[in-house]
Image (cartoon, rainbow, N blue to C red):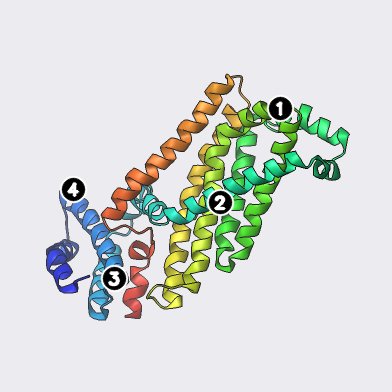
Amino acid sequence: MDLDAYVLAHAPEWRRLEELQRRSRLTGAEADELVELYQRVATHLSVVRTSAPDGALIAHLSSLLARTRYRTVGTRVGSWRGIATFFTDRFPAALYRLRWWWLGCLAANVVVIAVMMLWLLDNPAVEQSLLSPAEVDQLVDEDFEGYYSEYAAGNFAAQVWINNAWVTALCLALGILGFPVVYLLFQNISNLAVIGSIMHRHDHGQHFWGLLLPHGLLELTAVFVAGGVGLRLFWSWVEPRGLTRAQSIAREGRTAGTVALGLVAVLFVSGLIEGFVTPSGLPTAARVGIGVLAELLFLAYVFVLGRNAVLRGGTGDVDASLLEDRVATAE
């Protein structure tokens, strides 16, 4: 990146932000402008740090943002507008920037599930070694469907949300080690493959997919996103790409934090579908259609909002807007 050209292009915004943060009183329009400029300059700081690190410029922008942050403590920077910005900019930008990692993770897991199910169907002795005939009958006739209606819908949705949030959190937290993520994902999909093969062998395949797909499309996508981002965190210290290993790990670690927060909302939606739609009396086509719609909306969120956020300079790195005070102090 041409640093001089970048400074020339954005210096007027920096001067305007400095002018506004020095004023003792601001009109409503000026306050809104201050917040917008704060967010823009935070993005500028992130770009400078990653693309053309310059100590003096980083110190200047960090100090400017720190003073502005101090000025705006208690106002809308950390309120609903900040939450809206997270879901319209930072989270989708992180998903889009790391799309090849989690899409690759998704594709690999789907292939492994398919191969395992086909292999299990061709090797019935494996099923017999895992479950007795009575246990198989119990699973096929009662347990699989009963799982979705055992508790009240609200309680079940909360239970599912907590469980899946825990799995995704483990994938992200253990991502730095690499192998634990692969192990967690394999455990998750192997159970699915075993149950799916048993249901298919006993002519309940349509029943299996009719109960799994409404919530499972979005739920498993969220898990695979966490797995892909966790593996990217591992790769950040294997191949730092022009940064020091500490800088690379820090950047991807902060992005993983962004993804972890965003996936809480995604899993909340899948939990609601699993608690209220999957066990409902709706026709199978309607239930599966709701699951497909939720998945398509998520993908549109990533590839429309996320792409636009990245084009605006977003990376998903929370450092630009949350850690500038510490940077300014260090400088």
Q: Mark 1 points at which residue?
A: 204
State left or right for residue 109 relative to residue 146: left
Query: Identity of the amino acid at label 2?
Result: Ala
The answer to which of marks 3 and 1 sits earlier in the sequence is 3
Q: Where is residue 179 in the image (x, y as percent from the top left)?
A: 62, 64
**Residue 130 in which image quadrant:** top right
Residue 125 visible in this rendered orientation of the protein: yes
- Badge 1 crowding class, 10 Å Cα cut-off, few under 14, some 14 to 19, many 20 or more, is some
> How far apart are labels 3 and 1 at the CA level?
55 Å
Q: What element carries label 1?
A: loop
> How far apart are labels 3 and 2 at the CA level?
32 Å
> How far apart are labels 1 and 2 at the CA level?
26 Å
Q: Mark 4 points at which residue?
A: 28
The answer to which of marks 4 and 2 sits earlier in the sequence is 4
The answer to which of marks 3 and 2 sits earlier in the sequence is 3
Q: Are marks 4 and 3 in contact (CB under 8 Å)?
A: no
Residue 150 visible in this rendered orientation of the protein: no
From this view, report whether residue 286 is shown above or below residue 264: above
Q: Are marks 3 and 1 in contact (CB under 8 Å)?
A: no
State left or right for residue 6 relative to residue 190: left
> Residue placed at 14% from the left, 67% from the top?
11
- Of badges 1 and 4, nearer the viewer stands 1
Q: Are marks 1 and 4 in contact (CB under 8 Å)?
A: no
State left or right for residue 221 relative to residue 142: left
Q: Do the residues labelled 4 and 2 touch (CB within 8 Å)?
A: no
Toward the viewer: 80 or 116?
116
